[in-house]
Amino acid sequence: MRNEFLYQLLANALLTLHVGVVAFVIAGMVVVVIGNLRGWPWVNVLAFRLVHLVAIAIVVAQAWLGVACPLTALEMWLRASAGATTYRGSFIEHWLQRVLYYEAPSWVFTLGYSLFGLLVVAAWLYFPPGSQPRSNDRSA
């Protein structure tokens, strides 16, 4: 019983991490664009931009190669080890799972990930890392 609780706890923590990664990829894109338009210099720090680019590149590569996300695979293994078959348990399991997983054909996700990846590359080219942010301030 104790091991089941531990596996379930680890699965919940992993799901939370997974949602955080998704949020970073999406919010990172928004922050790069808005930050450049508002003149925030930190949005073009190379380390931030590289981590963001690598994160979406991994997602796109997995989609094109038909490889399951290792975070998802590990979470499912933890849930199976806990004897869990559904997400009916806790609040965090129920709601975060609904945010992260959708019912659609796999090509829809591959297309979406690819388009988002192209958007990240376009932002990389339009707002290069290490550059001064573009500003809407026309008075200077």
Image: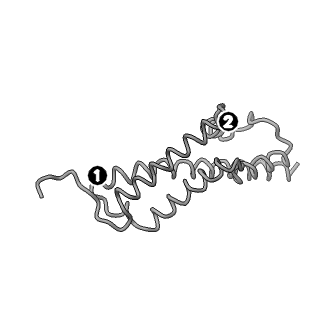
Task: Locate residue 105, reporting x and y percent.
Answer: 66, 33
Give me the C-alpha separation between circle 1 and circle 2. Answer: 37 Å
Task: Locate residue 97, reporting x and y percent.
Answer: 66, 39
Q: Nearer the viewer, residue 67 or 84?
A: 67
Q: Amino acid at mark 1?
A: Leu
Instruction: State whether residue 38 is above or below residue 83.
Output: below
Mark toward the viewer: 1 or 2: 1
Q: Label 2's element? A: helix
Tag 1 and tag 2, C-beta contact below 8 Å:
no
Left or right: 137 in relation to 23 = left
Q: Earlier in the sequence, mark 1 or mark 2?
A: 1
Task: Locate residue 40, reporting x and y percent.
Answer: 31, 59
Asked which quadrant contains residue 32, the reply is bottom left
Q: Amino acid at mark 2?
A: His
Q: In this figure, which residue is indicated by the disc labeled 2?
A: 94
Give the label on residue 37, or none.
Answer: 1
Q: Label 1's element? A: helix
Instruction: Give the total number of marks visible in the rendering.
Output: 2
- Tell which residue pokes out farthest to the right in this image: 1
Q: Nearer the viewer, residue 82 or 51?
A: 51
Task: Locate residue 64, reporting x and y percent.
Answer: 64, 48
Residue that appears at 74% across and 36% down: 87
